[in-house]
């Protein structure tokens, strides 16, 4: 099971070409972050995954099915897309009705609707807002509402567009839990993000884009310690990695806080032994 972009080009109606001969595969259960400067083609690439866009040239396959042969609604059953702005997706009068909307439209059994709704609201921390109008809750919570609505449909792939925008540390912790649970169930989670700390902490694979194509597709450590890719894609190292770089510890390729603590302790011990 996978999403495959095969030699894909995409040109917008105004004549602007956003992708040129891109090849990319997302497999079930993967955690994949797509990064790069604005205009690199990230959003266009993920919108091809659930047929918001159709390729101008090349093929996009979802579990072997060419997206050009299906409607956007049909592909959305398999690829759930969470927009950067939740207000582009929310249109129901209560949190619970928003989560249940697609389930009722697709005639899911009432008992199953209740089970999925309860689970999605619990996972996203929205249980206390069931009967609240979505526009009476803060923007960060509305973002979780759109995630809950997608989770409830049980897609095989979930795309999150800038999920950390506007979130605090609690929101980021909830996102981490959601990503962990979904991928643990075999669901692939793909994110577009400018938050490199979030990417390094939560995603095993990073696709760095520039010039309308993929510059580097590798594990997070290999991407964030590749100076050429960072410069070409105009992305920065995560905070911990940048501190290590400033200290001249490039060979250690530190990426996470616990690694930094261990490295500092080892350097302190070495300095103490020298004295």
Image: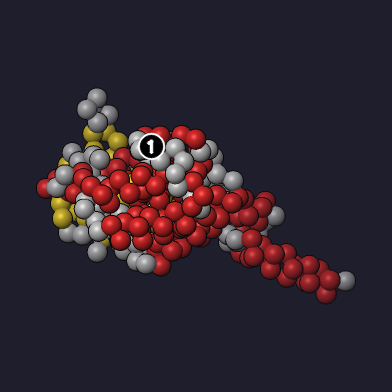
- The part of the image, by quadrant, that contains residue 120 is bottom left
Q: Is residue 220 in sight in this rendering?
A: no
Frontmost residue, 244 versus 26: 26
- The part of the image, by quadrant, that contains residue 186 is bottom left
Q: Is residue 74 in sight in this rendering?
A: yes
Q: Mark 1: which secondary structure?
A: loop
Residue 90 versus residue 104 in the image, above or below: above
Report the residue that reaches farthest toward the left. 69
Frontmost residue, 74 versus 252: 74
Q: Which residue is drawn at 11% across and 48% down?
A: 69
Q: Residues within 10 Å of mark 1 (few under 14, many from 20)?
A: few
Q: Is residue 38 left or right of residue 54?
A: right
Across and down, in percent, residue 203 comes to 46, 58
Q: Residue at x 50, y 43 (%)?
A: 141
Q: How many marks?
A: 1
Q: In this view, does 75 lie to the left or right of 170?
A: left
Residue 78 versus residue 232 in the image, above or below: below
Which colour scheme appears in the figure?
secondary structure
Frontmost residue, 75 versus 45: 75
Q: Quadrant of the image for the N terminus?
A: bottom left
Report the residue that reaches farthest toward the top. 14
Q: In this view, does 50 lie to the left or right of 138?
A: left
Q: Quadrant of the image for the C terminus?
A: bottom right
Report the residue that reaches farthest toward the bottom. 273
Across and down, in percent, residue 174 comes to 52, 55
- Per the image, the residue denoted by label 1 is 93
Across and down, in percent, residue 146 comes to 40, 45
Q: Which residue is drawn at 63% across and 55% down?
A: 240
Q: Which residue is drawn at 58% across and 59% down?
A: 255
Across and down, in percent, residue 245 comes to 64, 53
């Amino acid at each position: 099971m996978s999403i495959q972009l095969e030699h894909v080009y995409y040109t917008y109606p105004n004549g602007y070409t956003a992708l040129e001969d891109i090849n990319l595969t997302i497999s079930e259960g993967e955690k994949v972050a797509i990064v790069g400067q604005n205009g690199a083609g990230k959003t266009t690439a993920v919108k091809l995954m659930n047929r918001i866009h159709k390729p101008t040239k090349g093929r996009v396959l979802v579990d072997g099915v060419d997206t050009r042969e299906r409607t956007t609604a049909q592909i959305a059953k398999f690829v759930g897309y969470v927009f950067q702005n939740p207000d582009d997706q929310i249109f129901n009068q209560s949190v619970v009705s928003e989560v249940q909307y697609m389930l009722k439209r697709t005639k899911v059994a009432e008992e199953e609707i209740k089970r999925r709704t309860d689970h999605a609201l619990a996972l996203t921390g929205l249980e206390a807002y069931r009967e609240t109008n979505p526009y009476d809750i803060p923007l960060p919570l509305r973002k979780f509402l759109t995630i809950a609505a997608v989770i409830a449909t049980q897609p095989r792939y979930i795309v999150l567009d800038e999920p950390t925008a506007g979130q605090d540390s609690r929101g980021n912790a909830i996102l981490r839990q959601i990503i962990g649970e979904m991928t643990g169930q075999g669901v692939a989670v793909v994110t577009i993000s400018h938050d490199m700390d979030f990417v390094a902490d939560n995603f095993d694979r990073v696709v760095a884009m520039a010039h309308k194509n993929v510059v580097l597709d590798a594990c997070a450590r290999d991407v964030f310690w590749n100076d050429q890719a960072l410069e070409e894609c105009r992305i920065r190292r995560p905070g911990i990695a940048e501190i290590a770089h400033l200290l001249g510890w490039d060979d250690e390729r530190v990426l996470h806080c616990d690694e930094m603590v261990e490295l500092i302790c080892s350097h302190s011990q070495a300095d103490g032994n020298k004295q």
